Image (tube, helix red, strand yellow):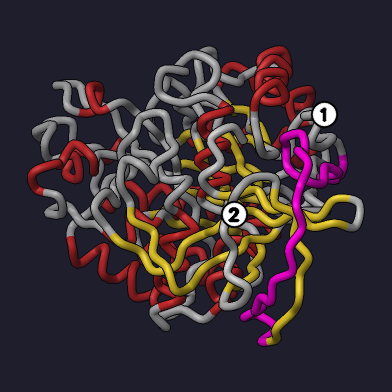
Amino acid sequence: MSHNFFTEGRTMDLHYSCLLHEQESAEFTEINVTDPLKQREIKLRVGISEDVFLPKKGLLVLPSGVDLHVHFREPGYTWKEDFKSGSVAALAGGITLAVDMPNTNPPVTSVERLLEKKQLRDRSSRIPVIIAGAIVEENTDDLPLLAKETSVLKAFLGNSFGKLHLTFEGFSKALSVLEKEQWNGVVFIHAEDPSLFNLDAFPEDHWKTRPEKSEIVAVKKVLKIAKEFPRVRIHLTHLSSANSVELIRKNNAEGHSSVSYDVTPAHLEFHKDSFIQESWKLKRNPPIRQKPIMERLRKLFLKGELFALASDHAPHTIEEKISADCPPGAPGVQELYPFLLDYTLRGILSWSEMIRMVRENPLRVLRQVKNLPHKLLVNPNDNSKINEAWIRSKVGWSLWEGRILRGRIVGILCEHEGEHFLVPQHKETL
């Protein structure tokens, strides 16, 4: 089966059908599954290409997920991750579409580099991946050409892994160019104001280095600039503060250009005093913050009020993370959907709230995507044990290691020429 998953022009029709690997001969079985969104039971005839036990009843069928923010590290950092290993981890976690960030080596700052990265994706990714281009000070004049080849551009207003920092002035100039081009994509923004960083803080106090205020001020500046270019869609990614969320809500409620956002599970689940013995796991940008800041953001999540969740899957090896120069980031694409599933099966979130955060609203951000047909089979009576055997990322560790989450994704259910096939979660050769 071809790996040409979609065409990235004015629309992106995901015209693939049964995921990304050649179908082996399948034996069919009939099972009864429950759709909790529609609150009804349906019968499915499912083809299975290997020896997998499926209960005849008790399984749930749910839409697959979208991860708006991943770093699959190819090219340039493939000892950490690559398109194959990252996409296998995504599939194991119920994700069938992801957006890959441009801070690879070389970074995606030109059409040539974007096309080269698409070739790498098409060669080995097991899921569709939208390749984001980077907006930097030096490529403003080339943005029209770059924008024609992708629906997502990324602006790093705060330095992170990679050297792609963009000033607020450069950001404003870029939006002017994109509005003039009537570009139909979306600009993703890493919003932190470097002028407010505390570079004198000790390395182990990473949360002091990049205080909450640096994000809030950056969000305010982004919203002010965005009002000047209302035709350009803006998405603020991996927000770490409820204050940031409330600023966006106020902006949108006042009728200004609609701005979307996402939050990571890590910023909802951990604070600076978590994992005291393994603090290296927590370092990321923006930082894992103090407990009161985390709890305010978490309250919005527990009420089902956040717009979208994304993993910011940013793997580094354990050796790199425990070094004196610990890089920011952690894996997370496989954990995103199970994290939400656990809260839903515990009755804290509704099914509709969960699907809105992991599927419906992410697809609203990526509005050029016209077709995402896959579903998940989930066993609500089993658990996901986050351990070495479960982890698919090449780096082999997880922030959730040792946790037991309610529910287990049995596999991806996809339709091909009128037949349903199951791609099991544990399939190593996806």
Mark with earlier residue (1, 2): 1
Q: Which residue is mark 2?
A: 411
The percent position of residue 142, horizontal first and vertical second, equals 72, 19
Tell me the magenta residue range: 10-39
Q: Is residue 12 above or below residue 64?
A: above
Foreground pick, 202 / 39: 39
Q: Quadrant of the N terminus?
A: top right
Q: Looking at this rendering, what residue extends furthest in the bottom direction?
A: 39
Residue 205 visible within the image: yes
Q: Which residue is mark 1?
A: 2
Q: Is residue 220 left or right of residue 171?
A: left
Foreground pick, 269 / 79: 79
Magenta segment, prevailing SS (helix, strand or loop): loop
Q: Is residue 419 left or right of residue 43?
A: right
At 69% across and 57% down in the image, what residue appears? 413
Residue 224 visible within the image: no
Amino acid residing under circle 2: Gly
Foreground pick, 90 / 131: 90
Query: Which picture quadrant has residue 20?
Result: top right
